[in-house]
Image (spheres, rainbow, N blue to C red):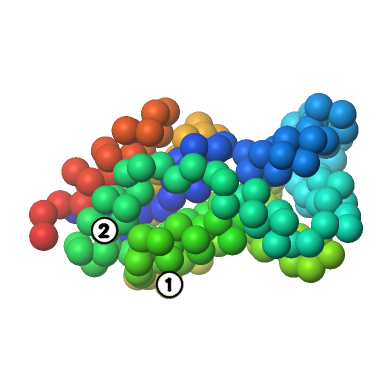
């Protein structure tokens, strides 16, 4: 039985791998300008923080509630409730570390009565603006690896007994110290978490 499970959120617990892009598409600005921000970051022309700041500036003048309404449209993986319920039943600490939005992670937590669950994700605030609490830059003190170090210490677990679950290969590489890894390629792959959790 694993001692803790670390989840990516976007594309792992949800059907949308990039919620930033989803919001841009709903507003109608992805194909005209927003895609260039992503390209600049991926090519190393901007840092992750700069990328996020530029992205959220495209939403200027909109209420945070409007952005949240688009995030509400994002499909949650149909197996999340079963997986979360099993984790709760077995008393295994869970951790979500996402460069997406805390709003969506909290919604998943509430809908599934998922406790204990630590959440590390970015926060949309009035403006709208973004408080960057998780960076996709590996060298950042807010990287997924840095948060995993802190979170596992909080829940009293260690890397060798931890399962990391993500749709992104770069997450699995960044958290390669975890003793167990699960690459989610399809919705049903999420159910493969359950055998790692042992019996009640």
Mark 2 surroundings within 10 Å by alpha-carbon count, few (fewer than 14), some (14 through 19), many (20 or more): some
User: Which quarter of the image is occupied by the C terminus?
Assistant: bottom left
- Give the mark, 1 or 2, whose residue is nearer the N terminus: 2
Foreground disc of the pair 1, 2: 2
Report if residue 157 is visible in the image.
no
Residue 178 image offset from top left, x and y in percent: 39, 47
Residue at mark 2: 85
Q: Between marks 1 and 2, how big is the CA–CA gap?
A: 21 Å
Splitting the image into 4 quarters, where does residue 16 fall?
Answer: top right
Q: Is residue 195 visible?
A: yes
Secondary structure under the numbered disc 2 in the rendered image: helix
Quarter of the image for residue 84 reads bottom left
Q: Residue at x 32, y 44 (%)?
A: 79
Question: Which residue occupies 87% across, 29% down?
Answer: 32
Between 126 and 132, the one lying in front of the other is: 126
98 lies above or below 116: above
Which numbered marker is on residue 154?
1
Placement of 125 over or under 39, stated as above or below = below
Q: Are marks 1 and 2 in contact (CB under 8 Å)?
A: no
User: Is 148 left, or right, of 37 in this rendering?
Assistant: left
Residue pictured at 38% horizontal, 33% vertical: 187
Disc number placed over residue 144 in the picture, else none: none
What residue is rendered at 57% in x and 52% in y? 72
Q: Position of residue 29 (x, y in %)?
A: 82, 35
> In this rendering, is residue 181 above or below 109?
above
- Residue 156 appears left or right of 60: left
User: Measured from the top left, where is residue 63 in percent x and y?
Assistant: 79, 62
**Image position of 23 (left or right of 74):** right
Q: Residue furthest left?
A: 199
Within 10 Å of the Cα at label 1, are there few (<14), some (14-19), or many (20+) other Cα atoms? Answer: few
């Amino acid at each position: 039985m694993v001692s803790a499970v670390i989840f990516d959120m976007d594309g792992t617990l949800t059907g949308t791998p990039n919620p930033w892009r989803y919001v841009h598409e709903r507003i109608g600005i992805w194909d005209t300008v927003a895609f260039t921000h992503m390209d600049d970051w991926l090519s190393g022309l901007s840092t992750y923080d700069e990328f996020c700041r530029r992205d959220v500036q495209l939403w200027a003048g909109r209420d945070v509630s409007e952005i949240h309404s688009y995030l509400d449209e994002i499909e949650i993986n149909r197996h999340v409730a079963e997986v979360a319920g099993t984790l709760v039943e077995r008393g295994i600490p869970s951790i979500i570390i996402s460069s997406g939005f805390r709003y969506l992670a909290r919604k998943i937590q509430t809908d599934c009565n998922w406790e204990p669950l630590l959440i590390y994700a970015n926060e949309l605030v009035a403006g709208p603006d973004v408080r960057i609490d998780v960076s996709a830059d590996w060298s950042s003190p807010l990287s997924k690896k840095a948060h995993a170090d802190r979170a596992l210490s909080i829940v009293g677990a260690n890397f060798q007994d931890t399962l990391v679950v993500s749709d992104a290969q770069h997450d699995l590489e960044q958290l390669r110290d975890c003793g167990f890894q699960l690459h989610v390629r399809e919705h049903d792959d999420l159910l493969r978490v359950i055998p790692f959790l042992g019996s009640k």
